[in-house]
Image (cartoon, rainbow, N blue to C red):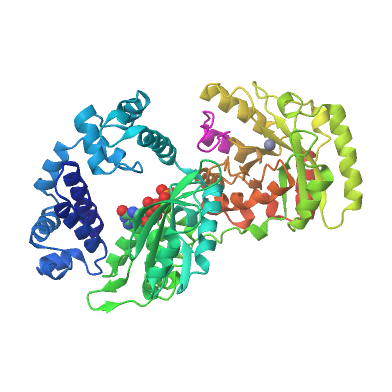
């Protein structure tokens, strides 16, 4: 059992005792002991073995005995008894602002409340307000707390979390004494959804930085305020709120802490095993052997010390990156600057907010060389899908605007609905007027997996279809994708040379990175599209590049890294087949 696990158990014992109504002195002994163990720089097992726990501040005789039992046997009967006596739901209640162990105990003893649901009911029926020391105001506050807790239990979209995190980073930047500062955790790995924000700083004077952190604008609650670690709740736009953790280490520890807190957990475990093969121990503070410490200035030095190439954070999901880094076969990942254009953007012709020309100017400002406009097709009436007449009108306008533009070309596309039976929403002669066709599912989501798979594969086999749009239709944290056999879809795409979109809109990020990896293995070409509905959304392609990187994709795996000349040639060749 490592020190984090031991510390967590000590902390929990402190809380369990509080819930039993024990006196504060005894409870705090456990909380303080937990913190001391958490901050221990030496290996806990060694300290226990050499019977030196007594030298650790805040560890008295009782804790020494308990910790020794835990570390040597992996169990602690005292703790297990306490747990049995306490309903687990009481811990959920403790997360509500204003509810300490005393009040939770009161609610449990008097009203039998041991879950959030029961507490919500008791508040709604007014029972809580009648308890001694509670009142109407407290009851209302508890109800609000339950609501925000339920919402916070869920994850947050990458773009929203990044926005919140950059606000925190900007607020911290001017704090005195910061040597290095980085975002860690799932944000640094660019996962599509984020549980909490992890920030790491190196400094010799952590105190004032911590003060700044817990007082930053947007911080609505301080969960913990310690010397080297603090946790807060920050409020974003709307009702969005997230937890954020700040850890401060000494600068020589920074590369190790940066690696550790970037994760993922699976990657960390595999790295620790690799270190062990070298007779070294790797943790958040150091890489060290029995009689030496490996000096690392940067994360790259840490990898080098284990004979590994630098592994970019996006790849650290323990899906073979350590092997590849050892063999020197890591991909050279695609970068945002590699993109030369995009293919899936909407204008005011369908449900976009900007005109053809406004979209083109925005793409140009981003340095793109081509912009594919792909408005919705006729049967999608709620999105003002285009009839063949209006297609002609738009294509004429595109030709006009193209004459005025220098350095950027607008390509004529469509986001054509895949009808319920797999046919496309336009006749072949209309389809032939486009430079390319994005085919997407926007209806009949409830089809069976077999029907949906056959429907999509039929579209993929249609020679007019250049690429499949948002392959699963998922809306992150809102709507599951429709049931579909993606493996079969990817195989069909590989056979026909149909491309698959990485929809970069942060609400979708569809194709998922896992399937990008598979698509690449099958030889399917991917294309990163922002699905922009306004000029400012074209830049969303950045999130698609994040997905592509997590999917091990290189520049050559993504179609829109090619020049305008090459793209034009490839599209023309495909049409003439
Ligand atoms: P999330 O759920 O979006 O917050 O994802 P992460 O990866 O940010 O996870 P988090 O915040 O729980 O922890 C941050 C990093 O700390 C994680 O990526 C790896 C490291 N870590 C956390 N718990 C453990 C653990 O039990 N063992 C190891 N080896 N590493 C851990
Ligand atoms: Ca995190
Ligand atoms: Zn679209």
Classify residue 462 as left or right of residue 230.
Answer: right
* Residue at image location 61% in from the left, 22% down from the top: 444
The overriding secondary structure of the stretch rendered in magenta is loop
Task: Looking at the picture, tell me which residue is in the foreground, 62 or 547.
Answer: 62
Specify the quadrant of the image occupied by residue 97. Answer: top left
Q: Position of residue 228 (x, y in %)?
A: 34, 65
Residue located 30% across and 26% down the image? 127
Tell me where the magenta segment starts and ends, as one range.
472-490
Against 255, residue 523 (above or below) is above
Q: Is residue 453 left or right of residue 73?
A: right
Is residue 465 placed above or below 309 in the rendered structure?
A: above
Let me know if residue 482 is in the magenta part: yes
x, y (%) of residue 303? 41, 68
> How far from the left and from the top, in percent, is residue 255?
41, 70
Q: Which quadrant is the C terminus positioned in?
A: top right
> Which quarter shows the N terminus?
bottom left
* Residue 310 in view in this figure: no
Residue 383 vs residue 509, the one in the foreground: 383
Residue 371 shown left or right of residue 5 in the figure: right
Residue 567 seen by the camera: yes
To which quarter of the image does residue 32 belong?
bottom left
Q: How many marks?
A: 0
- Left or right of residue 526: residue 409: right
Front residue of this view, candidates 446 and 577: 446
Which residue appears at 53% of the width and 52% of the height?
Answer: 164
At a point 76% along the width and 28% down the height, the residue shown is 384
Residue 283 drawn at (x, y percent) = 31, 65
């Amino acid at each position: 059992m490592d020190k984090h696990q031991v510390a967590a158990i000590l902390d929990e014992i402190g809380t369990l005792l509080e819930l039993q109504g024990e006196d504060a002195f005894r409870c705090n002994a456990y909380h303080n002991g937990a913190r001391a163990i958490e901050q221990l720089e030496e290996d806990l097992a060694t300290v226990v073995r050499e019977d030196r726990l007594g030298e650790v501040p805040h560890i008295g005789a009782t804790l020494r005995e308990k910790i020794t039992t835990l570390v040597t046997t992996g169990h602690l009967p005292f703790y297990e008894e306490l747990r049995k006596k306490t309903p687990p739901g009481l811990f959920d209640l403790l997360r509500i602002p204003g509810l300490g162990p005393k009040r939770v105990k009161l609610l449990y003893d008097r009203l039998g409340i041991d879950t959030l649901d029961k507490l919500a009911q008791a508040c709604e029926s007014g029972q809580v307000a009648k308890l001694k020391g509670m009142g109407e105001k407290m009851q209302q506050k508890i109800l609000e707390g339950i609501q925000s807790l339920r919402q916070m239990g869920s994850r947050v979209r990458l773009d929203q979390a990044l926005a919140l995190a950059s606000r925190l980073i900007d607020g911290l930047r001017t704090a005195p004494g910061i040597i290095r500062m980085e975002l860690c955790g799932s944000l640094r790995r660019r996962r599509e959804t984020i549980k909490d924000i992890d920030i790491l700083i190196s400094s010799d004077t952590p105190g004032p930085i911590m003060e700044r952190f817990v007082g930053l604008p947007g911080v609505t609650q301080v969960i913990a305020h310690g010397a080297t670690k603090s946790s807060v709740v920050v409020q974003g736009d709307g009702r969005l709120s997230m937890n954020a953790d700040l850890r401060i280490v000494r600068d020589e520890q920074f590369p190790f802490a940066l690696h550790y807190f970037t994760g993922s957990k699976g990657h960390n475990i595999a790295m620790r095993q690799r270190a062990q093969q070298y007779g070294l121990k790797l943790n958040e503070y150091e890489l060290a052997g029995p009689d030496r410490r490996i000096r690392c200035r940067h994360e790259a030095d840490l990898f080098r010390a284990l004979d590994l190439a630098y592994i970019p954070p996006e790849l650290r999901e323990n899906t073979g990156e350590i092997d590849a880094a050892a063999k020197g076969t890591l991909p050279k990942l695609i970068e945002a600057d590699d993109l030369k254009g995009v293919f899936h953007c909407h204008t005011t012709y369908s449900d976009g907010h900007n005109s053809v020309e406004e979209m083109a100017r925005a793409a140009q400002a981003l340095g793109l060389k081509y912009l594919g406009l792909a408005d919705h097709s006729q049967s999608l009436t709620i999105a003002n899908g285009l009839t063949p007449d209006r297609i002609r009108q738009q294509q004429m306008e595109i030709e006009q605007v193209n004459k005025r533009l220098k350095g950027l070309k607008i390509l004529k596309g469509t986001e054509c609905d895949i009808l319920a039976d797999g046919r496309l929403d336009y006749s072949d002669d209309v389809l032939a007027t486009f430079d390319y066709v994005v085919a997407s599912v926007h209806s009949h989501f409830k089809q069976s997996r077999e029907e949906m798979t056959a429907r999509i594969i039929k579209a993929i086999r249609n020679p007019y279809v250049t690429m499949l749009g948002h392959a699963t239709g998922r809306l992150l944290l809102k709507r599951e994708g429709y049931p579909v056999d993606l493996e079969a879809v990817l195989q069909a795409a590989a056979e026909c040379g149909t491309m698959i979109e990485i929809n970069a809109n942060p609400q979708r990020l569809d194709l998922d990175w896992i399937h990008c990896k598979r698509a690449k293995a099958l030889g399917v070409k991917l294309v990163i599209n922002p699905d922009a509905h306004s000029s400012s959304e074209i830049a969303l392609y950045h999130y698609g590049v994040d997905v592509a990187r997590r999917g091990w994709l290189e520049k050559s795996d993504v179609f829109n890294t090619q020049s305008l000349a090459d793209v034009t040639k490839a599209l023309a060749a495909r049409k003439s087949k």
